[in-house]
Amino acid sequence: MENKAIDINVDMGEGIGNEAEIMPFISSCNIACGGHAGDKTSMETVVRLAKTHLVKIGAHPSFPDRANFGRVHIDMSCAALFTSLKKQIKALQTILFKEHRVLHHVKPHGALYNVAAVNTKVAHVIIEVMKSLVLPVKLYVPYQSVIADIATKNGIGIVYEAFADRNYNEDLTLVSRQEKDALISDVDAMFNHVFNMVTKQRVKTISGKEINIMANTFCIHGDNPNAVVLIKNLKDKLELNGIAIR
C-alpha cells in the first residue's frame, strides 16, 4: 500500500544524450536552456520526450557561462543576471507553448544554485525572475537555504530538493566533487540514502552524523555513467517499499 509519494528529477539537455533512456523512470526534468548548455534543438527534443512520458518540465537556468558549464560563480550586476535568466527561461517557454506544455518549475544550475543558497543578493534576483513569470511556477530549492526563506516570504511556491547521488556535509552542503566520497554510485547505498531522508527526514552525513533534512524532490545527475541503472533501481526499490514516484 502506497503511503507516500516523492518526485525524482534529472537535469537534461546537457549533451549527455541519455534522456530517452532515463525519462520513463522519473517524474520531473530540468532542461538546460542555454546558459551552461542546451539550445533550441536539445530543448525541443527533451520537451517532446517529457510530453510523451507525462514528466513535469522545469527550466534549468544558470550563470551564462558555457565555457565552465555554469560551475563557476560569475560576478554580474543584478540587472544583467535578471536579464540572462529571464532570456533562458523564455527560450524554453517558447518551445513549451508550441508543444502545448506549461512550465512546472525552475531549478537553478550549478554555481547559481549553490550561491543562491547562501547569497541574499543572488537569491533576490532569482525570486524577481520567478515573480515575473506570471504563471504559478514552483522553485526547487535546498532545505534551510537563503533562497527558500526569501521565496516563502515572497509567496513563491517552493519544493525542497535533496540529492540522491551526493553525500552531504554536516552543514547540509554537498561534499565537494574533488573529494573521493562525493558521489554515491552503489544502488543499495543510494536507496538507503534516499529512504532515510524520505521516511525519517534525516540524512547521514559524510562524518557519520545524522542531520535533519526535508525534501520532496530528489535529484540524480544524468551525467553519471551509470545513471540509467541507478535511477531505475531507485525507483523500483522505493515503489517496493510503498513510496510512489509522481
Image (cartoon, helix red, strand yellow):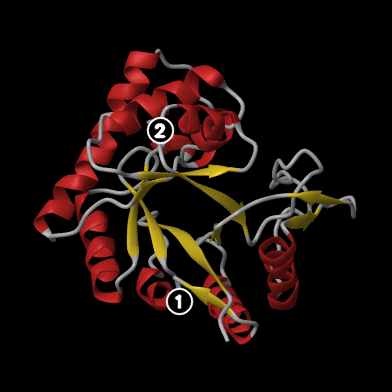
Say which quadrant the C terminus sits in: bottom left
- How many neighbours does mark 1 have within 10 angstroms: few (below 14), some (14-19), or many (20 or more)? many
Q: Amino acid at mark 1?
A: Phe
**Figure quadrant of residue 119:** top right
Position of residue 179 relative to residue 25, above or below, is above
- On the picture, is 43 further left or further right than 246? left
Kindly identify which numbered label has been placed on residue 167. Answer: none
Position of residue 68 relative to residue 213, above or below, is above
Q: Position of residue 212 (x, y in %)?
A: 76, 49
- How many neighbours does mark 2 have within 10 angstroms: few (below 14), some (14-19), or many (20 or more)? few
Q: CA distance from mark 2 to mark 1?
A: 31 Å
Determine the secondary structure under disc 1: helix
Kindly identify which numbered label has been placed on residue 25. Answer: 1
Q: Amino acid at mark 2?
A: Gly
Q: Residue at x 73, y 42 (%)?
A: 172
Q: Which of disc 1 and disc 2 is earlier in sequence?
A: 1
Residues at circles 2 and 1 in contact by the CB criterion of under 8 Å: no
Q: Position of residue 201 (x, y in %)?
A: 72, 57
Extreme residue in the left direction: 98
Q: Residue at x 38, y 72 (%)?
A: 23
In the image shown, does 129 or 155 lie closer to the viewer? 155
Extreme residue in the right direction: 208
Q: Residue at x 53, y 31 (%)?
A: 147
Q: Position of residue 233 (x, y in %)?
A: 59, 81
Position of residue 78 relative to residue 28, above or below, is above
Q: Which residue is mark 2?
A: 155
Determine the secondary structure under disc 2: loop
